[in-house]
Image (spheres, helix red, strand yellow):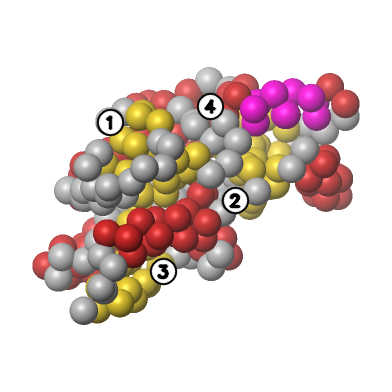
Amino acid sequence: MEKIIVFSDLDGTLLDHNNYSFDAAKPALELIAEKKIPLILSSSKSLAEIKEIQNELKLQHPFIVENGGAICIPQGYFKTEEDFELVESFLIKFLGPSYDDILQTLETIKEDSNFSFKGFNDIAVEEIMSLTDLPFDKAQQAKTRLCSEPVIWQDTLEKLPEFEDALKAHEYKLLKGGRFYHLMGNTDKGNGVRHLMKFYRKKYPKDQFVTIGVGDSPNDVD
């Protein structure tokens, strides 16, 4: 039996990049729901942000947060013996370093260099609102991170490769997003997809899977 699974980015794909509306994607969303095709959200957004979007769209499938930093699975969705952490009623498997480790690395780099940048941890919710045009509650959700840090680069573009080299020395990388750079471990959305597909194949061993990926940036190709 053939089973289709759709993996989709959010901003600039299901969500309008400017007003965060689902309106243009509604026909596709309705068709996916009608065909009972699992829609797996995969985004730079945080657990808190995607959890709310899942509720809005009435989705009860796993999802990938923070550009592949972790996969989030509703309890009981898969039978798995792997080690997971329970966070906000979801089973979380981290595929990269923790947020605390990321912040410590950033602090070390700041102390050892003269790069000019700020992370979400350094700024108030109100500044995130100004940068993203999000209301307070959604900006607060965006600030609540698990395994990556959005970075506002305030230095010259010429210094950016040097900053990336400093991150690589600590086994981190910098990913350019639609609005921010994202500091994260050596993982990506593709890694999240591969982990989830392993669970799907174990759950449905007799099925042949067709996966469809939808996105608007190079990191959606991983």
Using a 10 Å C-alpha cutoff, classify the residue at mark 1 as few (fewer than 14 neighbours), some (14 to 19) or many (20 or more).
few
Q: Main secondary structure of the magenta part?
A: helix
Residue 8: quarter of image: bottom left
Identify the disc placed on residue 89. Answer: 1
Mark 1 vs mark 4, CA separation in Å = 29 Å
Residue 140: quarter of image: top left
Label 3 vs label 2, nearer the camera: 2
State the image coordinates of residue 109 (x, y, percent, origin top left).
Answer: 80, 29
Whether 99 is among the magenta residues is no
Instruction: Looking at this view, name the residue that lies furthest to the left.
Output: 34
Identify the disc placed on residue 127. Answer: 4
Query: Is label 2 in contact with label 1 (beta carbons under 8 Å)?
Result: no
Give the mark nearest the N terminus, 3 or 4: 4
Give the mark nearest the N terminus, 3 or 1: 1
Label 4 vs label 2, nearer the camera: 2
Query: Mark 2: which amino acid?
Result: Thr
Identified at 43% across, 37% down, the residue is 83
Closest to the observer, 221 or 124: 221
Query: Is label 1 in contact with label 4 (beta carbons under 8 Å)?
Result: no
The residue at which mark 3 appears reads as: 213
Query: Mark 1: which amino acid?
Result: Ser
Residue 2: quarter of image: bottom left
Query: Mark 4: which amino acid?
Result: Glu
Q: Which residues are magenta?
A: 101-110
Residue 126 in view, yes or no: no
Say whether residue 75 is left or right of residue 50: left
